[in-house]
Image: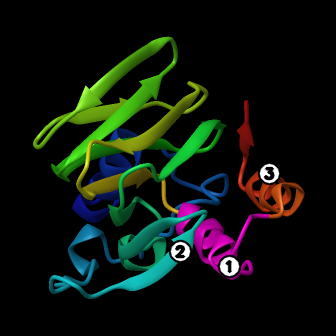
Amino acid sequence: MNRNDFLRAGLASAAGFTVGPLAANISIPPTGIGTLPSKIISSGNGTRHNVLGSVMTVKLTGEDTYGLLTLIEDLNQPGVGIPMHVHTREDEVFRVLEGEVEFVLGEETLILGVGDVAFAPRNIPHSWRVVGDRPARSIMLANPAGIENMFAQLGQLPVGPPDLAKVAEICGRYGISFV
């Protein structure tokens, strides 16, 4: 095995992917990992979506990372949150940058403040809600990528009270269900 093939296999293995014909969710180019293009996204830039009242700015997509991860910044007002749900395809990491967020992970409920991190593995129910009297800003990393496509579809729904059947249908296509 040459060095590039070794690095590709090692990277994919470490990320939990299979290299070869079964690797439908990752596309590392044959020249190796060194060909990933670098990217800088300035503060305030990215693709914005309003998803059920959550203002999301997608910073990195699967297209940017060969399917390895999605990175999203959230900026939300007090009271905004996402109800209890379960992912079957990706793990998520949340880090609070400003404000306070009530985070429910399985049976545990915690108030996360600046610098706090929560890891929500796939198949574990979780939810979050901004608490306190000021907005909260956080970063969410999802591995593998793809969830940004769901957020883009949800962001296209009409403003106002959500059509919960439509929301559930869109989320279901991405292996996410509400509990």
Q: Are marks 1 and 2 in contact (CB under 8 Å)?
A: yes
Residue 159 is labelled as 1
The residue pinned by badge 3 equals 172
Residue 14: percent from the left, percent from the top?
33, 40
What separation in Å lies between label 1 and label 3 (alpha carbons)? 21 Å
- Residue in the foreground of this view, choosing between 33 and 62: 62
At a point 86% along the width and 63% down the height, the residue shown is: 166
What separation in Å lies between label 1 and label 2 (alpha carbons)? 9 Å
Q: Residues within 10 Å of mark 2 (few under 14, many from 20)?
A: some
Report the span colored magenta. 147-162
**Amino acid type, callout 3:** Gly
Residue found at the very far top of the displayed protein: 107
At a point 37% along the width and 71% down the height, the residue shown is: 65
Where is the C terminus found, in terms of image quarters? top right
Of mark 1 and mark 3, the one earlier in the sequence is 1
Of labels 3 and 2, the one closer to you:
2
